[in-house]
Image (tube, rainbow, N blue to C red):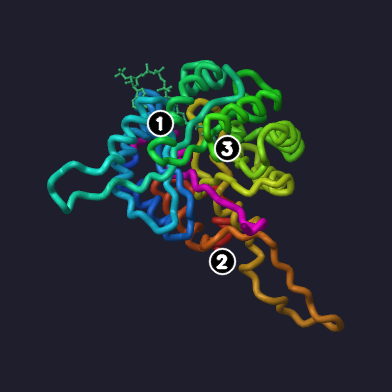
């Protein structure tokens, strides 16, 4: 495998939209997912099977999934908090028993994401149980998913600071991450839920987690509350991570993390990793040595940055605001 390949997981349709107060029609959510796939995004978190009493915006996830045009080589995942969510998902994934041969094929879900936290306070706020209770509840959910042929990704929230209990001990993040790996998760999404992380605190956390979990299994999920998410990604890349979550237009925030803003914008991540390719050779002649052309080494697959910027502007407009992606705004102004 290419050591310079960076996997981008688009979480806008889930993390990006889950906190929106007004209901967004399933058709809009599906259009977002379909446009992201067309723009070359190969991993999309499409929604969640959580309690509609807790997160009403995700209530229509089944319908959204039924409206997806499956794109080749694209993985679609959904969040599942408990066995009830898993059962609801498996229901819609089981092949239709209808005698009608034109029955629609099941939606293209390839993966589930289970989630827990590095603090009890956040775990209680987000899922109504302590960390240990949440791990006990998730183990059979992971087993069911694996038995059904689904990949399982595990999230750890509040890996740097917790909105309720302050700075988080990296050893907690390490322990919870290890338990998720033992449950069969192929990747651990380290969630800087509050976006408080800096390159220094993120590196310290990664150093601890890497004592127990292979860096190749770690993924960065940075909210951009303080504008440090891209810097944190570059730090994590330097540490060896090759998978990052991002949200088109910088959409989002967690309903249980007051004041936290959206994920790092996908446009900003793709720009930071490959943006130099937008520029041609050095234009103005200069005497002496021929100019050296610089090109970053990172490969994000077939992602088209111009299309992403358009999608970020479109979905932000649908929500009645400007995109928060700096690269998105700059690209649209070109
Ligand atoms: P609870 O209230 O303790 O559970 O919630 P319950 O079993 O008593 O269920 C309450 C009601 O919800 C019942 O309905 C259940 O049937 C129903 P009633 O009987 O009262 O009519 N219910 C469900 N309905 C549909 N699907 C389900 C489901 N489960 C129960 N799966 C629970 C516990 C875990 C369900 C709840 O706390 C919950 O749904 N939490 C999810 C919160 C959430 O989605 N947070 C955002 C995602 S995580 C995140 O954003 C962080 C991340 O981005 C990383 C980072 O940034 O850190 C991933
Ligand atoms: Mg998040």
> Which residue lies at the image location 55% right of the left edge and 60% below the top edge?
301
> Which residue lies at the image location 31% right of the left edge and 41% below the top edge?
93
Q: Is residue 124 visible?
A: yes
Which one is closest to the eye, mark 3 or mark 1? 1
At which x and y percent is residue 201? 74, 34
The magenta segment is 1-23
Calculate the distance from the C-alpha at mark 2 to the C-alpha at mark 3: 34 Å
Residue 39 within the segment the image draws in magenta: no
At which x and y percent is residue 171? 70, 25
Residue 14 within the segment the image draws in magenta: yes
What mark, if any, has residue 144 been given in the picture?
A: 1
Name above or below for residue 112 compared with residue 82: below
Residue matched to label 3: 189
Residue matched to label 2: 334
Name above or below for residue 284 compared with residue 77: below
Mostly what secondary structure, the magenta segment? loop
Q: Is mark 2 within 8 Å of ligand 2?
A: no
Calculate the distance from the C-alpha at mark 3 to the C-alpha at mark 1: 20 Å
Calculate the distance from the C-alpha at mark 2 to the C-alpha at mark 1: 49 Å
- In the rendered image, the residue lying farthest to the left is 99
Q: Is residue 109 left or right of residue 96?
A: right
Quadrant in which residue 221 is drawn: top right
Q: Is mark 3 within 8 Å of ligand 1?
A: yes
């Amino acid at each position: 495998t290419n050591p310079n390949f960076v996997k981008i997981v688009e979480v806008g349709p889930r993390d990006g939209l889950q906190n929106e107060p007004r209901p967004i029609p399933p058709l809009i959510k599906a259009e977002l997912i379909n446009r992201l796939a067309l723009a070359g995004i190969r991993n999309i978190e499409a929604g969640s099977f959580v309690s509609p009493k807790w997160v009403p915006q995700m209530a229509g996830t089944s319908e959204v999934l039924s409206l997806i045009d499956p794109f080749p080589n694209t993985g679609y995942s959904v969040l599942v908090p408990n066995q009830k969510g898993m059962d609801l998902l498996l229901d819609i994934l089981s092949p239709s028993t209808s005698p009608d041969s034109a029955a629609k094929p099941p939606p293209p879900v390839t993966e589930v994401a289970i989630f827990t936290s590095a603090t009890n306070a956040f775990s209680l706020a987000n899922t109504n149980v302590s960390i240990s209770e949440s791990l006990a509840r998730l183990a059979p959910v992971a087993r069911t998913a694996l038995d059904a042929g689904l990949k399982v990704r595990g999230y750890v929230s509040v890996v740097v600071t917790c909105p309720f209990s302050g700075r988080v001990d990296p050893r907690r993040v390490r322990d919870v991450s290890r338990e998720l790996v033992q449950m069969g998760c192929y990747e651990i999404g380290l969630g800087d839920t509050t976006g408080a992380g800096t390159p220094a605190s993120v590196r310290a956390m990664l150093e601890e987690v890497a004592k127990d979990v292979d860096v190749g299994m770690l993924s960065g999920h940075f909210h951009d509350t303080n504008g440090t998410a891209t810097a944190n990604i570059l730090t994590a890349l330097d540490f060896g991570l090759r998978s990052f979550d991002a949200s088109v237009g910088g959409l989002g925030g967690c309903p249980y993390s007051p004041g936290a803003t959206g994920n790092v914008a996908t446009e900003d991540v793709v720009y930071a990793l490959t943006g130099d390719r937008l520029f041609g050779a050095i234009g103005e002649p200069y005497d002496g040595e021929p100019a050296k052309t610089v090109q970053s080494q990172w490969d994000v697959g077939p992602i088209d940055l111009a299309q992403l910027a358009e999608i970020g502007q479109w979905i932000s407009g649908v929500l009645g605001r400007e995109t928060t992606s700096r690269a998105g705004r700059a690209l649209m102004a070109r």
